Image (cartoon, grey):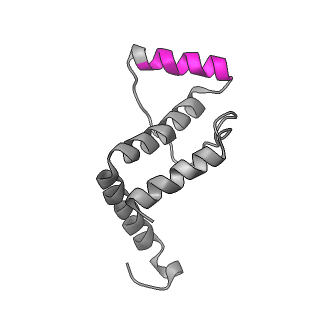
Amino acid sequence: MAGPSYITALRNAVQQNRAAYCSPPRTGGKQVSVRLDDFLLNHVEAISELAEWNRSEVLYAIAHYGLFLLYESAPQTAEKAVASIMAKFKARHADELGGTP
């Protein structure tokens, strides 16, 4: 699934589960270090306090929603990004998928 289909699926998933970000999203896996200016950090900390989430959970939710909005407004970017992600996935799991990368 790529491009507009991917965006439609994301939109449908969000609309069907409007409570998705009413509880902290699951975080884990690879870690990334980021530096935020005071403007962004103040917003993240305020949301964290109000939602009773930690900063990592707030940033995780913001990233997911931000990707959704980006792909919705630029479907050509979504198509290229999803194609790139799938190519890496297929290369990494070629033996499990029964083919070559």
Q: Residue 6's spot in the image, x, y percent?
A: 46, 58
- Indicate the quadrant containing the C terminus: top left, top right, bottom left or bottom right: bottom left
**Residue 43 is inside the magenta segment:** yes
Looking at this view, is 70 or 89 the one in front?
70
Residues in magenta?
A: 40-51
Residue drawn at (34%, 59%), measured in percent from left and top?
A: 79
Across and down, in percent, residue 8 comes to 48, 54
Q: Position of residue 64 (x, y in %)?
A: 50, 42
The secondary structure that most of the magenta stretch takes on is: helix
User: Furthest residue to the bottom?
Assistant: 98
Judge from the rendering whether residue 96 lies leftward or rightward of residue 75; answer left or right: right
Residue 5 lies in what quarter of the image? bottom left
Which residue lies at the image location 39% right of the left edge and 47% below the top edge?
71
Residue that appears at 56% across and 32% down = 56
Please tell me whether residue 94 is drawn above or below residue 4 in the rendered image.
below
Q: Quadrant of the N terminus?
A: bottom left
Q: On screen, 43 above or below 30?
A: above
